[in-house]
């Protein structure tokens, strides 16, 4: 359960409804997910987070599906249960197969493993990897 | 500085040299990076980690470049300095542009931000996201 | 569910009851929260944790409400569900408004985002920030 | 060393210079810190991050100094060396004393400790802490 | 609930059944835990993870019980609910007492606390701790 | 470099010198490490942290060497460079061999990997693992 009430569209002030409308239109949804209903408790955070996500997650040098997979990998690393669920769903909607999700989590798993090994041995950075400031 | 000496090829036992040889051949390198020289202090970990990485990071349902970008996103999340350097270099070798790395880190940044928001509000998982066990 | 039983006051040894008594008296509670009932499985940890928390969270150079908000920000970062719930409740008891909690989580979110960006770009520390050892 | 070059004002495109100008004016600085010079490698991230930070870190229901202290606590939790340095400096500029920083890190330390204890015992959330969705 | 279905033995392909058989035989179990049923959605990850765990967690320079306790400490640090439950159970099966688990979590708690203090103060590494590369 | 000056014994107030004396006597050292010199900027944190560590890390149901290894595993997970160095040194002083440290980091690596896999698949806890509250 949330630490704040989830704000439904009908109970929301106009500024929140405007953001909800844009989310539903952009993502072709009939209602917004719980994440947005929770953020609606603090309208400036709702609006800023939505504007940022809309800009970051769209088409660009990286494919939107790749971006959802990256989001999932980070969320698994951070133990964010809700985020894992929502970004797995989003990735599947964009065409992610079981094999893609399987490989993605395998990579995330190996990254977490070798991050710990590197930090545990405190491996010094190879000179060849460095970029001059 | 490392907490263990870095084992150079010349000083390594045969089982370590065999792994180093396979790394250099597979990745077309003249010498292995410091990560492998550190793992060589524990040969079973060296061999297991290399065999796992070779299997996980190769061609599959996901592109090797996508995998390197995911690795970078996780490493940035975990504050692994060495890993950020080595996987940025690996991603560039596979063709990552400045725009791709810029977008990748923007996604990783947003994921870390919304993970904290979700955990801070303890947003309950939408019923529609769940998969029956 | 816990991985250990929760120890109720009635079933607790005298050394645990003494700590429970001090918690209830200091915080003006009728019974202790589940956290303390779990720690009671290891009395030295119960006592040490309570003594430390009592010292750290009280009035000082920082306001107790500020301390609860900091606690909440760290707990959200670490994905500690219980801690988010208990420190949100504690902050509200000390007067935290919806706007304060909204801003607090917005700051925690931005911190997690820029931490990932900084680690992803491995930004070198500005000379002006450093303090001589 | 960074994984990207640091972009100096003189070498920056006009859109980056405009953001740098606003940072220097808002914060009363003669030049921007390395963080912004690194983000300048991806102008949309530079602009979005600055606009977000400007909105989040200003005066509101919470004091700007409290916000810097929260930022420092999260950065210490995430092992972000640069961020610890820059937000310690920012907090001191806003009046943080040694005692305040000492108490802040003591709270952050206790939060990280009890987060691990709670997660290690998997303490169930008290009914009284929950908010209806 | 999982983001993938849990694959039961009866519904699994032969390659998965072979791994399940080896897990049950090695650990003297009548059926495998949910972790393996989830990994069975991606057979290469199932097989690689099992082979690695079997090698790493067995008898060696460290006692298997010590290894389970270390696993528990890391899982508590990472807020992995499932892992905390499964490795607490595994540790108890190998003889862990309440006192051992209590001390283990006390150590993990102190480590998380002092990690945050060290990162918050950015304590420089003592010369005497360093190993020449 | 630290964000606070390191306090040397000669420059420390009496309450700090008393803690330094106890550290040096208990651990048979000629001078305290940088960690303590940094904490000395906030004497209550110095004293509380030392008293807690002295109690937690001593002989008990777990061996002091096992405790140092657990500390190292957590520190590697949290990317605490200083802590990795200091607890590797402490473990070696208590008799840790290269094989022990190699196995320890292998376990920590696997734990971080499977934590991410479990969180990525959101594996539900097996009924058999649960303890009644």
Image (cartoon, coloured by chain):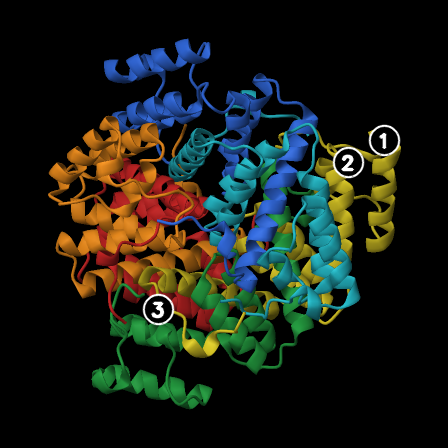
Chain colours: A yellow, B green, C blue, D cyan, E red, F orange
Residue shown at 54%/36% (left/top)? Answer: D69
Residue shown at 71%/57% (left/top)? Answer: D20
Q: Along the horizontal axis of the image, is D111 left or right of E5?
A: left
Q: Is residue D79 visible?
A: yes
Q: Which residue does the numbered mark 2 point to in the structure image?
A: A43
Q: Quadrant of the C terminus of chain E?
A: bottom left
Quadrant in which residue A44 is drawn: top right
Residue shown at 29%/13% (left/top)? Answer: C18
Chain that bears disc 1:
A
- With respect to residue C129, does C51 lie above or below? above
Q: Are marks 1 and 3 on the same chain?
A: no
Chain that bears disc 3:
E
* Front label number (1 vs 3): 1
The secondary structure type at the circle numbered 2 is helix
Residue E9 in the image: state x and y as whole percent. Answer: 46, 61
Chain that bears disc 2:
A
Residue A86 in the image: state x and y as whole percent. Answer: 66, 51
Q: Which residue does the numbered mark 3 point to in the structure image?
A: E51
- With respect to residue C40, does A98 lie above or below? below
Residue C8 in the image: state x and y as whole percent. Answer: 36, 18
Gap between marks 2 and 3, in whole Å? Answer: 50 Å
Q: Along the polypeptide, which appears first: circle 2 or circle 1?
A: 1
Q: Are marks 2 and 1 in contact (CB under 8 Å)?
A: yes
């Amino acid at each position: 359960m949330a630490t704040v009430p989830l704000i439904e569209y009908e109970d929301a002030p106009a500024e929140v409804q405007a953001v909800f409308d844009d989310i539903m239109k952009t993502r072709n949804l009939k209602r917004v997910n719980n994440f947005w209903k929770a953020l609606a408790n603090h309208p400036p955070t709702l609006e800023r987070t939505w504007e940022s996500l809309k800009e970051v997650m769209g088409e660009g040098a990286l494919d939107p599906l790749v971006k959802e997979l990256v989001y999932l990998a980070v969320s698994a690393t951070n133990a964010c249960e809700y985020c894992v669920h929502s970004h797995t769903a989003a990735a599947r909607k964009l065409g992610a197969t079981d094999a893609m999700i399987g490989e993605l989590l395998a990579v995330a798993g190996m990254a977490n493993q070798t991050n710990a090994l590197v930090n545990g041995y405190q491996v010094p950075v190879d000179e060849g990897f460095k970029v001059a400031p």
